[in-house]
Amino acid sequence: MSSPLGDKSKAFALEIIKICNEVKRSKRESVLTNQLIRSGTSIGANIREAFYGHSRADFVAKLQIALKECAESEYWLELLIESGYYSDSAILEQCVEMKKLLISSINTAKKNMK
């Protein structure tokens, strides 16, 4: 099943994997990147799971988990960028965009529950 949110989250996860591997290789940093790879790839996994939820409430709950993982990823990206381990802020902008999409999707799904 393909969806814009699912596609964007998968592309984001793949970019996170590349960035984390690059930072680990070049900067020898693993604490922040290990956290980021977990949260950054979890977003898409929870979105995918949401599409197979048992109910609208289950769908919303999975998207809310994805949103939390997205917020966590945003934090780790901020730390990587502000500490100088990584310099391209485009991935942070992508994360913020994903967060906005998730918030909008959650609000729409909640509105449709009524």
Image: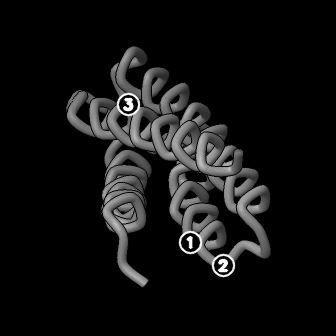
* Vertical comparison of 61 with 103: above or below: below
**Pointer 3 or 2: first along the chain:** 2
> Where's residue 42, x and y in %?
60, 58
Residue, far top: 82
For marks 3 and 1, give the CA distance: 19 Å
* SS at badge 3: helix
Q: 10 Å neighbourhood of mark 1: few (<14), some, or many (≥20)?
A: many
Q: 10 Å neighbourhood of mark 3: few (<14), some, or many (≥20)?
A: some
Which residue carries the number 1 mark?
Answer: 48
> Where's residue 30, x and y in %?
56, 45
Whether residues under marks 1 and 2 lie with C-beta atoms below 8 angstroms apart, the answer is: yes
Horizontal side of 83 relative to 33 (left or right) equals left
- Number of numbered discs: 3
Figure quadrant of the C terminus: top right
Name the kind of residue labelled 3 in the image: Val
Residue drawn at the location 35% of the way across and 55% of the way down: 12
Residue 52: numbered disc: 2
Horizontal side of 110 relative to 79 (left or right) equals right
Residue, far bottom: 1
For marks 1 and 2, give the CA distance: 7 Å
Residue 96: numbered disc: 3
Horizontal side of 20 relative to 113 (left or right) equals left
Name the kind of residue labelled 1 in the image: Arg
Task: Compare residues 88 and 83 and report the one nearer the observer.
Answer: 88
Task: Compare residues 71 and 104 and report the one nearer the observer.
Answer: 104
Residue drawn at the location 64% of the way across and 66% of the way down: 50
Name the kind of residue labelled 2 in the image: Tyr
